[in-house]
Amino acid sequence: MEEQGLLKEQPWRLLEFYSGIGGMRYSAIKAGVNAKMVEAFDINDLANDVYEHNFGHRPFQGNIQTLTAADLDRYKANVWLLSPPCQPYTRQGLQKQSADARAFSFLQILEIIPQLMLPPSMLFVENVVGFETSDTHQKMIQILKENQFVTQEFILSPLQFGIPYSRPRYFCLAKRKPLSFYNPEFNGQLLYVPKPLLGENDNEMLQTCLPIESFLEFVNSKGKNGTFTDEEDSLNKYLVPSNLIERWGSAMDIVYPDSKRCCCFTKSYYRYVKGTGSLLATIMPITRDKTSLEELCLRYFTPREVSNLHSFPKEFEFPEHVTLRQRYALLGNSLSVAVVAPLLHYLFSES
Ligand SMILES: C[S@@+](CC[C@H](N)C(=O)[O-])C[C@H]1O[C@@H](n2cnc3c(N)ncnc32)[C@H](O)[C@@H]1O
């Protein structure tokens, strides 16, 4: 992790719970915080393969719910980064919240805090929009308060950071007293704008949103005779089949290379077309509203392109054995580095 310390000489010791493919770790690196990732935890074998492939360290593979206070004290960590499962809170799900078994490990880990000899000084929690109105959120805030944390909460999307990608997410930043936020006037608030994170010169930069084109790995047009060139040949597997276009065309979110927005990619992208993420028109029509969907040569965004939209670094890659569907599933669970990095930078900034 980069050694541009923001706060103190000794690196902060980080634990990354629910590490997945490492979005939090990439964000911490991008944030330039003086920190050392002491351990990551995830139950998913495949996610751990990807994490290990990119970071050279295999996360602790097991259920976070089984961790004890003694286990956690051993890491001597002072910062916890957590992106627990979102299914208990998603609009599409049953919204069982804390009663959903997938919420148990998160509640359990929070309940351990008062038992720790070395409780964390800072916490960062990421989840879906909807979490902020759940009983899990209520319990989290109560536990944090009881343990002397002050919080600032945000709902932010990459669109607010110059990325043409709508992926609003909930974030909770927590600091244990006597630590305090750089802008303490936002304590206890839920903000929908990144105001406290911005420096004086940032506003202008954020107003310019890049087009989708800047995130693509392939040129988007077919050759003159309607066939693919060599480079585009590998794009065949990303084309949307005609039967899906006929059946679901009206429900598809279609974007163009010059678009300045696309929809959130979910873990079911490529398995289903409705509501799982945008599809790209590879032919730029002269008149958009009069062109049939068939003529647009719709394709899925490639996993590389989805990771670009998640602002993952260019070096990020999947090990070969991870299938296409698995890549989309793992990316659909992950987070936007463009949003999390400035939030982490802000969390680590001293007041
Ligand atoms: C929302 S995803 C987090 C993704 C991660 N932030 C990333 O960048 O890829 C939740 C992750 O938690 C893991 N997970 C869910 N329940 C778990 C548990 N009880 N113990 C350990 N890992 C768990 C899942 O395997 C999944 O990778």
Image (spheres, rainbow, N blue to C red):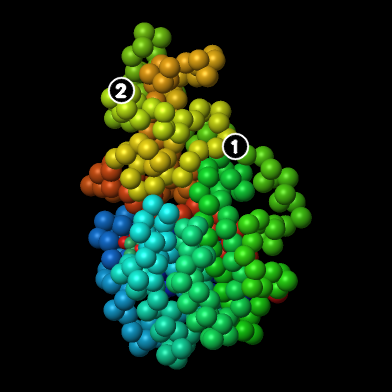
Q: On the rendered structure, is 185 left or right of 30?
A: right
Q: Count up the numbered dots.
A: 2
Which picture quadrant has residue 62? bottom left
Q: Nearer the viewer, residue 318 or 149?
A: 149
Q: Position of residue 287 (x, y in %)?
A: 54, 15
Could one spot residue 81 in this view of the protein? no
The residue positioned farthest toward the left in the image shown: 321
Could one spot residue 270 in this view of the protein? yes
Which picture quadrant has residue 156? bottom right
**Where does label 1 land, which residue?**
210
Which picture quadrant has residue 207? top right
SS assignment at label 2: helix
Q: Are marks 1 and 2 in contact (CB under 8 Å)?
A: no
Numbered label attached to residue 308: none
Determine whether 126 is above or below 91 in the image.
Answer: below
Q: Is mark 2 within 8 Å of ligand 1?
A: no
Instruction: Categorize mark 1 by other alpha carbons within 10 Å: few (<14), some (14-19), many (20+).
Output: some
Give me the residue at 27% from left, 61% from top: 44
Q: Nearer the viewer, residue 226 or 26?
A: 226
Q: Position of residue 152 (x, y in %)?
A: 61, 69
Q: In which quadrant will I find the C terminus? A: bottom right
**Where does label 2 land, which residue?**
242
Q: Earlier in the sequence, mark 1 or mark 2?
A: 1
Q: Position of residue 271 (x, y in %)?
A: 29, 40
The residue positioned farthest toward the top in the image shown: 225
Dot 1 amino acid type: Leu
Give me the residue at 25% from left, 44% from top: 323
Dot 2 amino acid type: Ser
SS assignment at label 1: loop
| Quadrant of the displayed image that contains ligand 1 | bottom left
